[in-house]
Amino acid sequence: MSVTGRISSITPTVTPQFHHPSSAAILPLRLHKTRLHHASLRCSNSSFLNPIRLSPLTTTTKTLTRRPTSIQMSMEAGIGLMGTKLGMMTYFESTGKVVPVTVIGFREGNIVTQVKTDDTDGYNAVQVGYRRVRDKKLTKPEMGHLEKSGVIPLRHLQEFRLQSVEGFEPNQKLELEELFKEGDLVDVSGTTIGKGFQGGIKRHNFKRGLMTHGSKSHRALGSIGAGTTPGRVYKGKKMPGQMGGTKTKIRKLKVVKIDSDLRVVMINGAVPGKPGNLIRITPAKIVGKNIPKN
């Protein structure tokens, strides 16, 4: 008998059986839950001809509770004023003591332009305008905002967040003599003088290397971190960069003199910025006395 005849004489004894499983029964693999709450795949004793059903994986889902968004803003101890830095001078007290002071003048302005309350805006604040300008110097939205309160065109608008806004109304004039007195402590904020790109010695008061004895490191920064571990530079590393030109607040400066005729106030010490810069003056914050502890 030839080879062809032998092959044809063999009759198959096993007939393939095809099942039509439902959508839940698919693969002969079963998902098992481990201690680390991860799903792992393990082979079972089934075959593709005898599929099994996948057991449902029970997982605990945690509901994320988000905190309600609120206005994150610094609370002031009281209403303040805006002024213009004029320069520094020497002031002689009645006892003959010499005090270096900064003279701050006040142009036309310091008028309440808007009063914000919890019902209308979600927080209590008083918006104050400063420095009168011509109408064409402002945009139409800015003019419409000021005309709504019946206020003259003002260049600068700033808010003072307070615990209570009772007694304030739009188009109200804020007087220097009513808010501050000689001897009061105030917080003064402004934009510092820009110094441009500076090195580590001027920007962070680093110490330079030796200039003699064969030293080759004079004003260089030096090492900024390890190589292999961590293999990177930590965030916040003090390095060369842009210096100045940022908003800064000097706290608890003493009011030395108030001159109503010249409309200036003299404050002990130096304040941020150069002559002509905008200055913001507020009562000094004393926790537990004029602002709450929490």
Image (cartoon, grey):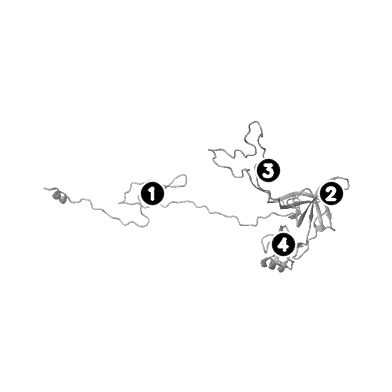
Separation of residues labelled 3 and 1 (CA atoms): 66 Å
Give the labeled residue for mark 4: 155
Mark 3 and mark 4 lie on one chain; the one further toward the N terminus is 4
Question: Which residue occupies the foreground of this view, 242 or 66?
Answer: 242
Give the labeled residue for mark 1: 30
Q: Which numbered marker is on residue 177?
A: none
Question: Which residue occupies the foreground of this view, 17 or 230?
Answer: 230
Give the labeled residue for mark 3: 202
Please state which amino acid type lies under the numbered disc 4: Arg
Residue at x 65%, y 42% (from the top left corner):
200
Please state which amino acid type lies under the numbered disc 3: Lys
Q: Is residue 292 left or right of residue 217?
A: right
Mark 1 and mark 4 lie on one chain; the one further toward the N terminus is 1
Q: Which numbered marker is on residue 91?
A: 2
The percent position of residue 192, horizontal first and vertical second, equals 71, 51
| Residue 287 shows in the view | no
- Residue situated furthest top in the rendering: 213
Question: Which residue occupies the foreground of this view, 69 or 14?
Answer: 69
Separation of residues labelled 4 and 2 (CA atoms): 32 Å
The percent position of residue 64, horizontal first and vertical second, equals 54, 54
Mark 3 and mark 1 lie on one chain; the one further toward the N terminus is 1
Separation of residues labelled 1 and 4 (CA atoms): 71 Å
Q: Nearer the viewer, mark 1 or mark 4?
A: 4
Question: Which quarter of the figure has residue 264?
Answer: bottom right
Dot 4 crowding, Cα within 10 Å, few <14, some 14–19, many 20+:
some
- 3 and 1 marks in contact (CB < 8 Å): no
